[in-house]
Amino acid sequence: MTEIFTWLGPIAMGAVVVVLLLGLWNMMRGGSASRSQTLMRWRVGLQFLAVVIIMIGLYLSTS
């Protein structure tokens, strides 16, 4: 079971980085403010999901 979280953790962190970079790129090139806002909201949600996945993985690996 912990093998799943071994893979999901880095994937979730990678998704956070991708969305963060997309949001920053959109802001730097002067794109739509609403698109940047949407991407940053996705980033916050993905960060929450990444933290939950990592914490579950740590919990399962210690028990």
Image: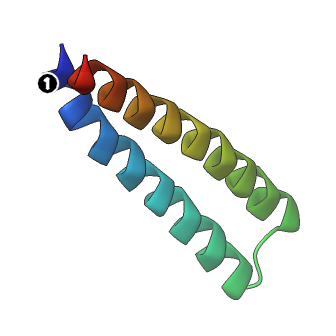
Q: On the image, numbered disc 1 is attached to which residue?
A: 3
Identify whether 2 is placed above or below 23: above
x 81%, y 68%: residue: 32
Residue 29 appears in the picture as rendered: no
Relative height, residue 42 to residue 29 (above, below)? above
Q: Position of residue 62 (x, y in %)?
A: 25, 25
> Could you say where residue 23 lies in the image, as x and y percent from the top left?
64, 67
Above or below for 18 versus 24? above
- The residue lying at 47 percent from left, 40 percent from top is 50
SS label for mark 1: helix
> Hey, which residue is sitting farthest front in the picture?
63
Q: Amino acid at mark 1?
A: Glu
The C terminus - image quarter:
top left
Report the front residue among 61 and 7.
61
**Residue 12: image location, x then y, percent:** 39, 42
Is 13 on the left-hand or right-hand side of 19? left
Q: Residue furthest left?
A: 3
17 relative to 25 in the view: left or right = left
Give the residue at x 81% y 58%. 37
